[in-house]
Amino acid sequence: MVIIMLGAPGTGKGTVAGILKEKLNIPQVSTGDIFRKNMKEGTKLGKLAESYISKGKLVPDDVTIDIVKNRLDEKDVENGIILDGFPRTVKQAEELDKILESKGKKVDIVVNLTTPKEEIIERIVNRRVCSNQDCKTIYNIVLNPPKKEGICDKCGSELIKRKDDNVETVEARLENYFEVTSPLVEYYEKKGNLYSTMVSKTINKLGQDVAKELVEKLKNK
Ligand code: ADP
Ligand code: ZN
């Protein structure tokens, strides 16, 4: 099963994907996480990615598509994958379709999350992530704080704030989303596999609730 997480930054893609991964036992592949891992290790890819990410810009298509193409060749994703943060441009979506087609696969469901802008900014600023690469649990210090400040409930590792999670880059990231990523909503709507839902405290629905809904829906598929 190929699941795509679509939505502006801070809508809860990572949270939903993390829960789906556990419940459905399908690997989660986040292009953002791959870039951050490379940035931390100081690789060539990491340096290149950082020059874009630090400005709130998207990493170029050719680089990003190559990464996902190679990742899709790995054995662990043969039976399913949750793509979190990819595709983010129409070009990426078209290339993904080609890659999947060559493997006799297709995108099964596109989960499109929407959140009011003010809430997105608030969430991004309050977001903390577990520094343990195998855990990566996401917290919100206001809405969903850890039991012990700065420490992951699940694995006890230190929580960190992403460098790009600041008010300066968030506007640029949102602009990117509305300009180049949001056309994907229509792209997938036309294909008939879009599942859109709002994630917002105003309707008392957070990522955890969406994940629950999806697990029920996908279990019967
Ligand atoms: P968020 O959804 O909060 O922006 P991500 O971890 O998905 O977080 O992405 C972080 C950054 O990594 C993005 O702002 C962008 O610069 C880069 N990035 C991630 N995925 C892609 C992609 N598919 N194409 C281009 N750039 C990407
Ligand atoms: Zn953790």
Image: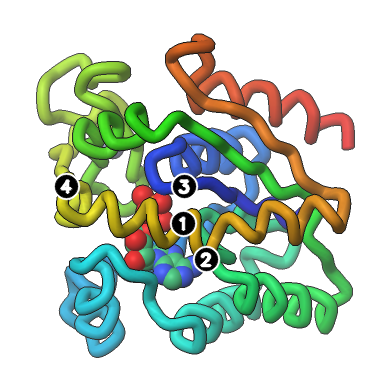
Is the shortest distance between ligand 1 and the CB of mark 3 under 8 Å?
yes
Residue 10 against residue 201 in the figure, above or below = below
- Tell me residue 161's x, y (percent): 16, 44
Q: Give the mark toward the camera: 4 or 1.
A: 1
Give the Cα distance between marks 2 and 3: 11 Å
Q: Tell me if residue 74 can be seen.
A: no
Q: CA distance from mark 1 to mark 3?
A: 6 Å
Q: Residue at x 21, y 48 (%)?
A: 165
The answer to whether one can see residue 36 in this image is yes
CB at disc 1 and ligand 1 closer than 8 Å: no
Query: Label 1's element?
Result: helix
Residue 100 percent across, percent down from the top left: 77, 74
Kindly identify the residue that appears in the image at 80 percent across and 51 percent down. Answer: 189
Q: Amino acid at mark 3?
A: Ala
Q: Earlier in the sequence, mark 1 or mark 3?
A: 3
The residue that mark 4 highlights is 166
- Check whether the beta carbons of the residues at disc 1 and disc 3 lie within 8 A of each other: yes
Given the image, on which type of amino acid does mark 4 rest?
Asn
Residue annotated with mark 2: 180
The label shown at residue 8 is 3
Judged by depth in the image, the label closer to the viewer, 2 or 3, is 2
Instruction: Where is residue 94? Give x, y as percent.
Output: 71, 76
